[in-house]
Structures are given as structure tokens and as C-alpha cells.
Amino acid sequence: GQSLEQPSEVTAVEGAIVQINCTYQTSGFYGLSWYQQHDGGAPTFLSYNALDGLEETGRFSSFLSRSDSYGYLLLQELQMKDSASYFCAVCNQAGTALIFGKGTTLSVSS
Amino acid sequence: SQTIHQWPATLVQPVGSPLSLECTVEGTSNPNLYWYRQAAGRGLQLLFYSVGIGQISSEVPQNLSASRPQDRQFILSSKKLLLSDSGFYLCAWTSGVSTDTQYFGPGTRLTVL
């Protein structure tokens, strides 16, 4: 089956850089996705890595190492609005559904 | 553009009562549809997914069921709610090509008393 591990909480200050790690165990691997969820809201898609390396989208970047079964989400120039939960996710073995990690709560302080 | 609707937004139900949550998607055809539950402060638990009308896959055995009577409609039901059914229920869709990019509805916050 699929399983993912990520830290439960991360704290940082405005303007800083923070990295949220995710390790996974899968039966078949298609890629690693990241989602953001603000308190009380629905998750929104941030990024997807199918191949090794770094994908950059504005202040957010995501990295994947397939050989290490490891990825991370990098958030730069942190802002208060980045305080949220961040989930990594992988496809199930059939490639028909996503399995999510338990989420990392990021708290950004001034 | 595609939009996804869920209703109701909030619901308070007594233990033992039935449940019906509805999700509809607009602006796309033959989407993959998903139901997730999120307990307070917890992760997303996949409950059901559907790749087509009448095709339902269950991920977690429990007293919930799902149906897909139309291409863009996904319904979550229960005959008798339990206290443990309380949570935030999220519907999501993807195109059949890209399962990794899921779009979530606004969710239904269910409290069972």
C-alpha cells in the first residue's frame, strides 16, 4: 500500500525560508503532489513532480528524488498568509486516486 | 471553466439519522470523482472514488456509501449516522488523464450529536 510521512508542525518567521519534507512508500509511483489548506477551507493544488529535480512556481518550489523516495516543498519569502496545512500526496497503485499524508501545519509569525 | 459544488455547507444531525451529501461538477465531462473525510486537525482520508457512472470504489469499510447516478454528480450517503462520522467532507474531481491535480469543492462540515 501507499504511505507518506511528513512533519506534523513547522514554525517560521516572515521573510524566512522553510522546507517541508515528505517521504513515501508506494507500490508503483507516478509522482508526488503538494496541496495547501487554510484553516476551514478546502485543499488547493500547489505542485506536482513526476521526475527528479526541482520545480519552481513563484515563491514555492517542489523537489523530488525518486531513488530516495523523498520530496520536499520549499517556501521562500514567507508571508503570514502562508500559515496553513501542507499535504504531500501520491497516487494509489491503480493510478486512480490520491493518498494524502497527514499534513504539516506551518505557522508563520511576524 | 470548471466548478465544483457541494451542499449543504454545514449540517448538524442526530446519531442514527440518515445522511445525503451531494457534489456536482460543471464544465467538464467524465471526471474522476472523490469523497474525502477530514477529522478536526487531521489529514484527508479517502472514502470513495468513481471513474464513471455507477462505478464506485470504496477505500474504507464503514457505514457510508456512495453513488454516481449521473456523470457529474456524486452522492455520499448513510442510513444511520454515528458520532464518529462527524468531520469535514470534501468532494474532489480530476480529469481522467491527470489524477494528481485534484480540485476540491468547498466542503460540508458535519456534526453528529
Image (cartoon, rainbow, N blue to C red):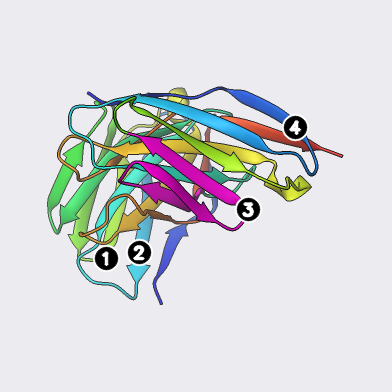
Q: Position of residue A98 (x, y in %)?
A: 31, 41
Three-letter amino acid code at disc 1? Arg
* Residue B24, numbered circle: 2
Q: Which numbered mark, 1 or 3, is in the foreground of this view?
A: 3
In the foreground, B14 or B10: B10
Which portion, as a residue range, is magenta?
A43-65
Q: Assess whether mark 1 and mark 2 are in contact (beta carbons under 8 angstroms).
A: yes
**Neighbourhood count class around disc 1 (C-alpha, 10 Å): few under 14, some 14–19, many 20 upward:** many
Three-letter amino acid code at disc 3? Arg
Q: Which numbered mark, 3 or 4, is in the foreground of this view?
A: 3
Residue drawn at x 30%, y 33% is A66
Q: Which residue is mark 1?
A: B72
Q: Which residue is mark 3?
A: A59
In the foreground, B51 or A8: A8
Could you tell me which chain the residue with mark 4 belongs to?
Answer: A
Q: Position of residue B47 (x, y in %)?
A: 31, 36
Whole-angstrom CA distance, mark 1 to mark 3, is 35 Å
Rendered view: B21 above or below B27: above
